[in-house]
Amino acid sequence: MVRSDPANPDSPSTLYDLIAGLAAKASDRQLWALLGSSLLTGSGVLLGAPDLWPVAALAGTLGSIGTWGLLAHRERSHPSRGARVAQRLLVLLGSAFALAAMLALFFGILGPRWML
């Protein structure tokens, strides 16, 4: 968890607030670039070297952050229930990708006996 700074009350108190704040402040161009590069990286890794799937999972996490930010920008001008539901699903999907990548890294550090 990210602690808020008492001197700066606008600082994020959780990791979700930090990521959501960064994605909401980014421009559409930056978010499209993040989404495109993560899709290319993830699909390239899965097609070229499937053993490196944790890298593709991290790319999936970044892609979900980019998509979340694009939906947040759209939500400002066109609020809808579907966009809010999609954002919640993207949070779950991105968290699952990040958790899978972290577990793969952890088991990779433990050695070949523990590899998935």
Image (spheres, rainbow, N blue to C red):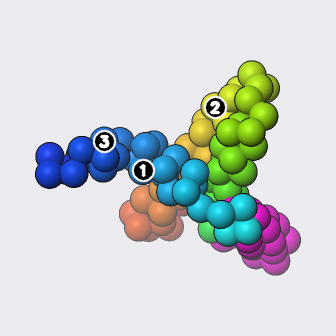
Q: Please report the residue visible at 76 percent of the width from the left and 64 percent of the height from the top.
A: 32
The residue carrying pointer 1 sits among few (fewer than 14), some (14 to 19) or many (20 or more) residues within 10 Å by Cα, namely some
Q: Using the numbered discs, state the Cα–Cα distance from disc 1 to disc 2 in whole angstroms.
A: 16 Å
Residue holding disc 1: 18
The residue carrying pointer 2 sits among few (fewer than 14), some (14 to 19) or many (20 or more) residues within 10 Å by Cα, namely few
Q: Is residue 106 magenta?
A: no
Which amino acid does the dot numbered 1 rest on? Leu
Mark 1 or mark 2: whose residue is earlier in sequence: 1
Instruction: Give the magenta-colored segment's residue range.
Output: 31-52
Residue holding disc 3: 13
Q: Say left or right for 39 vs 105.
A: right
Mark 2 or mark 3: whose residue is earlier in sequence: 3
Q: Say left or right for 26 vs 15.
A: right
Residue 28: x and y in percent read 72, 61
Q: Which of the 4 quarters of the picture holds residue 51?
A: bottom right
Q: Is residue 63 visible?
A: yes
Q: Are marks 3 and 1 in contact (CB under 8 Å)?
A: no
Per the rendering, the mark at residue 88 is 2
Specify the principal SS of the magenta part.
Answer: helix
Q: Which of the 4 quarters of the picture holds residue 1?
A: top left
Which amino acid does the dot numbered 3 rest on? Ser
Residue 23: x and y in percent read 57, 54
Q: Please report the residue visible at 67 percent of the width from the left and 69 percent of the height from the top.
A: 30
Q: Is residue 36 magenta?
A: yes
Nearer the observer: mark 2 or 3; the answer is 3
- Location of the C terminus (image quadrant): bottom right
Q: Please report the residue visible at 78 percent of the width from the left and 34 percent of the height from the top.
A: 78
